Image: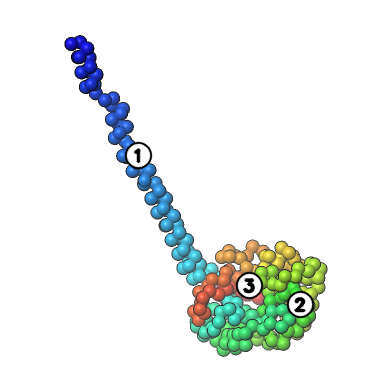
Amino acid sequence: MRLLATRLMTRWEPMPQSTLADQGDTPRLSRRRRRWPLIGILAVVVLSGTLAIWWFLWVPNWRPPLEEGERYGIDVSAHQDVIDWRRVADDGITFAYIKATEGGDFTDDRFDENWRGAQDAGLDRGAYHYFTLCTPGAEQARHFLDVAPPESDALPPAVDLELAGNCSARPSLSEVKEQLGDFINLVEEAWGREVILYVGDDFERAYPVRHKLHRPLWHHRFLLRPDLDGWLIWQLHGYARVDGIGGGVDLNVMRASS
């Protein structure tokens, strides 16, 4: 009987409380583990949506506050296709730099059209040349002057110095300075004004000329004001929305000329 009683007591011995508690916590832990991935996914979705709004809506439509004497402008080429210049002018744009030439023989297909259209709409306009490393500077200058001869009411001419989109040649620094000097001297002699230099960071790293040529600078810096001396034009980015232009366009701010 004693043995039977011992077996019965063993059979009906209560389960330890810790075991019951562990079983009760298991569903809650599982739910928590399932919840964290959902929170992470939601956070990624919210962040992605915020970045998309910033990039596609805020950046293209934002214009920086202007300081005294500053004004908004754009730079364009045939890449912008047909432009309604009167709508551009009505959207607060007061000047435009228009691509005229590249190298020694390329002329932008829409230069004449854009040059006349900007003038008719009342915008100040200037012509710019994309300088290549495969053609003598004097030859490039003559081509630019054939397409964009001096006009007293135009903005000073500008030269675009970038490696992106340039030819494959990489001459020495001394050779680049010589050819660029030939271009600048001929254009300035014809126009009677200093050229404006747009020096891309890639070009400056290979050929540091930005501060050695002592010319007004047209400087690109995404959304932030230029952090260098001597800038005349600040290019913010190439995604701006401007009435009269389909797609993005380079937005610029020009200081008052000294």
Q: Amino acid at mark 2?
A: Thr
Among the two numbered marks 1 and 3 on one chain, the one whose residue lies closer to the N terminus: 1
User: Which residue in the protein does label 1 denote?
Assistant: 29
**In the image, residue 235 lies at what x, y percent?**
60, 70
**In the image, residue 38 lies at what x, y percent?**
38, 50
Q: Amino acid at mark 3?
A: Ile
Residue closest to the eye, 6 or 222 = 6
Residue closest to the eye, 140 or 257 = 140
**In the image, residue 7 lies at what x, y percent?**
23, 17
Tell me the quarter of the image containing the C terminus: bottom right
Q: Quadrant of residue 99?
A: bottom right
Tell me the quarter of the image containing the N terminus: top left
User: Which residue in the protein does label 2 denote?
Assistant: 135
**Mark pair 1, 2: CA separation:** 72 Å
* Residue at the spot 32% in from the left edge and 40% down from the top edge: 28
113 relative to 192 in the view: left or right: left
Q: Quadrant of residue 251?
A: bottom right
**In the image, residue 115 lies at what x, y percent?**
61, 86
Among the two numbered marks 1 and 2 on one chain, the one whose residue lies closer to the N terminus: 1
Residue 192 visible in the shown view: no
> Between tags 1 and 3, which lies in front?
1
* Crowd around label 2: few <14 · some 14–19 · many ≥20 (10 Å): some
Q: Amino acid at mark 1?
A: Leu
User: Which residue in the protein does label 3 denote?
Assistant: 233
